[in-house]
């Protein structure tokens, strides 16, 4: 497979993962969903590592140690991004939250500006277009609240930092990059979940389903389909990270980021087709502007 096709595969898997995660977090809550997605994602990548090892392709401990610092940064930033994204999706339209979070591809460009790298004319145009799109979304009071947009922007920052760090780790070892990212996020979110449970703040599974809530077993049975959806979302996200890491080693970072940044389009289309999510004309224009602007910036 070429780098472009792998980046496209990353966009498709990330987009589907985003839709499943956004739909599920409205049912079981953000923290339980994070636990399910991150643990399942780690499990998938550990399984891939074991299979490759059994087939005579063992991991290189030296490369894994070198990739670890970048992967830890990527994992921490990704966890911030997912937390903010799921909060945005639970309170507003996925067709808006996902494209705004997709503006994370602007982070490498903004970082370059701060470090003295001159932007290209295409990147300046893309920044302007993305800014105009965000302004349109903010002006449409019926599309999303300010809190939803703020959470989506925070998600974009988290994902943008993760994108840069993941690309650095992938240059050393693609599988190490993806696996160590999840090895960072899974323990962190598990620790948060356990602390919240001890304080009695954890969201009870099934409480928002309208199903049986009279007993603990009833709540878990009612939440089971959504837990399964969360597991699938976590696995798809992990596979998407692996696809992006592979794409980064076969093509340039701007090209991989440009194609990978189309995942919000997949999420928005699924939200429109599957759950009938509708946006106003202004919101649709703003969404298109943010996605196109982010793609132009990453390509420039």
Image (cartoon, grey):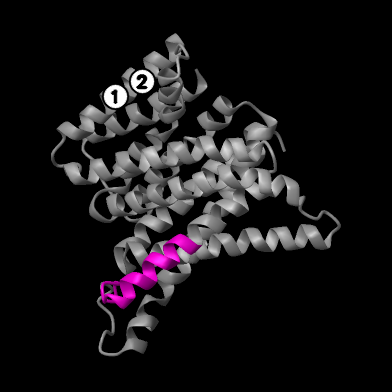
Q: Classify mark 2: residues with Cα within 10 Å, few (<14), some (14-19) or many (20+).
A: many
In percent of width and height, residue 294 lies at 41, 27
Which residue is found at the position 28% from the left and 85% from the top? 212
Residue farthest left in this picture: 141
Q: Nearer the viewer, residue 151 or 168?
A: 168
Disc 2 target residue: 127
**Residue 281 visible in the picture:** no
Marker disc for residue 131:
1
Picture quadrant of residue 291: top left
Mark linked to residue 211? none
- Residue visible at 33% across and 61% down in the picture: 30
Residue 298 image position (x, y, % from top left)? 48, 25
Residues at marks 1 and 2, CA–CA distance in whole angstroms: 6 Å
Q: Please report the bounds of the magenta region as a residue range.
A: 187-207
Q: Are marks 1 and 2 in contact (CB under 8 Å)?
A: yes
| Residue ID at (74%, 52%) | 61
């Amino acid at each position: 497979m070429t780098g472009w096709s792998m980046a496209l595969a990353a966009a498709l898997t990330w987009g589907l993962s985003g839709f499943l995660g956004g739909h599920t977090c409205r049912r079981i809550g953000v923290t339980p969903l994070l636990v399910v997605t991150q643990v399942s994602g780690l499990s998938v990548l550990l399984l891939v590592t074991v299979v490759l090892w059994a087939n005579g392709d063992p991991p290189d401990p030296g490369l894994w140690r070198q990739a670890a610092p970048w992967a830890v940064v990527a994992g921490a930033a990704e966890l911030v991004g997912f937390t903010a994204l799921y909060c945005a999706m639970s309170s507003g339209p996925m067709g808006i939250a996902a494209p705004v979070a997709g503006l994370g591809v602007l982070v490498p460009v903004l970082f370059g500006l701060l470090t003295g790298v001159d932007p290209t004319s295409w990147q300046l145009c893309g920044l302007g277009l993305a800014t105009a799109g965000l302004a349109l979304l903010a002006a449409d009071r019926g599309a999303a609240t300010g809190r939803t947009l703020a959470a989506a922007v925070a998600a974009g920052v988290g994902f943008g930092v993760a994108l840069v760090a993941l690309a650095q780790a992938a240059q050393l070892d693609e599988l190490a990059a993806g696996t160590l990212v999840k090895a960072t996020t899974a323990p962190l979110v598990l620790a948060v979940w356990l602390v919240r449970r001890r304080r009695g703040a954890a969201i009870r599974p099934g409480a928002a389903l309208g199903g049986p809530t009279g007993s603990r077993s009833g709540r878990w049975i009612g939440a089971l389909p959504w837990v399964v959806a969360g597991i699938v979302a976590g696995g798809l996200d992990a596979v998407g990270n692996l696809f992006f890491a592979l794409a980064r080693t076969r093509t340039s970072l701007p090209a991989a980021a440009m194609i990978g940044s189309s995942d919000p389009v997949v999420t928005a289309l699924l939200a429109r087709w599957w759950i009938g999510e509708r946006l106003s004309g202004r919101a649709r224009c703003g969404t298109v502007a943010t996605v196109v602007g982010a793609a132009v910036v990453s390509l420039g």
